[in-house]
Amino acid sequence: MNGIHDLGGMHGFGPVDPEPNEPVFHHDWERRAFALNLAAGFLGRWNIDMGRYAREHMPPAEYLATTYYEHWLYGLERLLVEKGLVTGKELEAMRPQGPVAGVKALGVDDLPKALRNRRAARMDDHLATPRFKAGDRVRTKNLNPTGHTRLPRYARDKVGVIDRDHGVFIFADAHAVTGQKVPQRCYSVRFEGRELWGPDAGPRDAIYIDLFEPYLEPAYPEGGHT
Amino acid sequence: MNGIHDLGGMHGFGPVDPEPNEPVFHHDWERRAFALNLAAGFLGRWNIDMGRYAREHMPPAEYLATTYYEHWLYGLERLLVEKGLVTGKELEAMRPQGPVAGVKALGVDDLPKALRNRRAARMDDHLATPRFKAGDRVRTKNLNPTGHTRLPRYARDKVGVIDRDHGVFIFADAHAVTGQKVPQRCYSVRFEGRELWGPDAGPRDAIYIDLFEPYLEPAYPEGGHT
Amino acid sequence: MSDHHHGHDHAHEHEHDDRPGAHGAPLTDIQLRVRALESLLVDKGLVDPKALDTLIDTYETKVGPRNGARVVAKAWVDPAFKQRLLADSTAAIAELGYIGRQGEDMVVLENTPKVHNVVVCTLCSCYPWPVLGLPPVWYKSGPYRARTVIDPRGVLREFGVDVGDDVEVRVWDSTAELRYLVLPERPQGTEGMTEEQLADLVTRDAMIGVAQVKAPRRW
Amino acid sequence: MSDHHHGHDHAHEHEHDDRPGAHGAPLTDIQLRVRALESLLVDKGLVDPKALDTLIDTYETKVGPRNGARVVAKAWVDPAFKQRLLADSTAAIAELGYIGRQGEDMVVLENTPKVHNVVVCTLCSCYPWPVLGLPPVWYKSGPYRARTVIDPRGVLREFGVDVGDDVEVRVWDSTAELRYLVLPERPQGTEGMTEEQLADLVTRDAMIGVAQVKAPRRW
């Protein structure tokens, strides 16, 4: 979706404002909201792409007016109801009305294994033959789906060069909506700043974006119109 | 600027929500904010493009969280200070500290003439020879200025056809920043929905956008890569 | 889920009588701010409070969609006017006396059985004041500005307008100083109506392009 | 000018001790909401409060940029490790025991006199947890996410990094599940330092690419 989360290239946000000696958390509720997200995620009722997609549904004014862990909290509440772990009524009253069948909270003993996973989105490389290789010129498609996508608006219908083939990963766009693990090649694509932003961009700026193969098509050779 | 005001094509805002029997104003402060904007504008210290550009500077979270006349109020306060009619101190204290030389408030008697102006942004047609004519294929440039522009993000680097030549108008981008009245042709350009939004757009949707000549360059003929 | 819901709720607040002392209700921050700013500008001699009153009265009671409706009705009954209206919209509209601010350069868009026009301003909220008055909240809202260019048929459906697949939808994004007025199709069964009666049928929404004009039921 | 300034102000609030009963301060809406949600999920048997405590402790005290600093320092002193690190970043980092969530697929980017790398996630705030811990507020903020891809040198200047015109800036937008770590240039004048001493010099910001590593003054 062309959501408010897709911030790349926007003006008007003012300077970056780093905080000296910033703590990991600023409030105790942030600690709990963070941990609740992870712990509820371990129940396996949704995947990380569904998690991102849920947060993207926060109303735009609210998204910009709130902080990161408030986005997480919004997404968590949305998913808990959507995936049937909590009813809307329970969430409103904040009182349990019945058990959830077939779900077991992750205990402290299960945590080390859960946190030290070695494989999440990566799939076996043989599941998808690469269509492109390093050095190939590609054009991103002009896609504007209402569903989830990891092709940012600023990088649509733009020509770049494959920097490297990362291998095969779960295709986020499908995973967020259907939960299906569709294997797709993921490439790092290099774009010149001037291709993305026009003549005013720095002549020695390049932007590398990780893009799934379905976002890409072969580009006409240099010298043709791009 | 790629500001939060440039909303065309965004998802996530929910349905349009018309209000039955909507009044012209919802609050008395809206009446006053509206009239203050017009009356202060009549002092001639800024033009309409400066007015728009000022509103575009509202911080994004604030812009989305507030209503139209709050945007106007923000822009008015900003311009009053920027153009030296009110000092920052006066605005903060809301108390006058001194007169402004060479300024005269528009009186009731001057209003009819001011409101019934017949010519605002249009300039003499002979001031700029048209580079394009109806039927010409054009490509919009990929411009991402930090200044004011009336080329929306969703219509950059896209191919369309000149629908009509509106004649010569004050070029908004320059007018908003320098106040100079640079004459430029303004065209209505027709874009097919699929050119702007990709294959999922309706096959019989077209978007017409009024664009100044400096935004446009000739497009390669149909059949070439667009 | 959060208490940050300022924006769109405003759309459904009806008139709050926040004039001085009304019902003894306390003034909100924004009311206080606008009042203070007005005092400041009046004290500095930058604005004349009487001129403010006249401006408000003009746009609240004198200029409104009734003007546009008269233009449309005249075009329906007077083929020569219609021709002038489509050829030079600004001049033809001026024949009826509708001129001025935010209507200096008008373009009239004719709906036909094969073409449906709808107007939006994605970058701010440009609107043809002399013929339609000031824009409604929904026209200035995020949803309308965001969606009309990318999903015009979806927006139209929400307004109850189902445009057939064989009809082309033309969206006009008012990005410059041209202002657009849609000339809706004259509904069938209105042949005997007078210009004045026809004008009564023409709604603001039809002239923005988000409604069609309907014949009265019992005509 | 308005009272709608929720967002970025949070960045500069220091730790508010809002644990139960702390200083007797009243609980805010968001505190109450999170507490109620936790009770609900615990009561429904969906989460174990002890697991929550362990998760918090892990990411607040055990995992952090010190891990990444060790990777960088080792790469500086051990050419064979550096070679492995650039060839298969995930495996080389795992040699030091840094594996797991949000670091399953790592890519290390080497800064050189001719190339400066900087990492951002414009769409959310992806960040390599096992080597850097949880991201700082500025990394997750609108300004950083919006500007780094369109004005990287401007952003770097605000961080005090002035990249010469002859140096290429490479911005890495983490749009998929790869996680990036910048290998900064080893500062001159640190030849005699031990790996542990070098690790002390490496900051989180340098490994995101918004700072350079400086030699200690009195070395």
Image (cartoon, coloured by chain):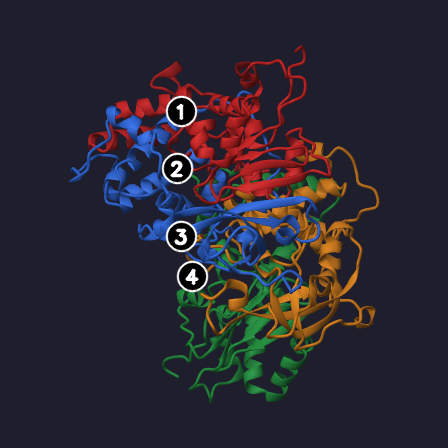
Chain colours: A orange, B blue, C red, D green
Q: Is residue C1 visible?
A: yes
Q: Nearer the viewer, residue A47 or C99?
A: C99
Identity, as a three-letter code, of the amino acid under mark 3: Gln
Determine which of the numbered discs, if any, sits on residue B184 in the image: 3
> Marks 4 and 1: CB-CB under 8 Å?
no
| Residue D43, percent from left and from top | 72, 40
Q: Residue at x 59, y 61 (%)?
A: A155
Q: Nearer the viewer, residue D61 or B178?
A: B178
Please indicate whether residue B5 sits to the left or right of residue A119 in the image. Answer: left
Kindly identify which residue carries mark 4: A20
Please indicate whether residue C155 sits to the left or right of residue A16 in the image. Answer: right
Secondary structure of the residue carrying tag 4 is loop
Q: Residue at x 58, y 76 (%)?
A: D109
> Marks 1 and 2: CB-CB under 8 Å?
no
Identity, as a three-letter code, of the amino acid under mark 4: Pro
Marks 1 and 2: same chain?
no
Q: Chain of mark 4?
A: A
The vertical placement of D45 against C53, above or below, is below
Mark closer to the observer (3, 4): 3
Kindly identify which residue carries mark 1: C97
10 Å crowding of disc 2: few (<14), some (14-19), many (20+):
many
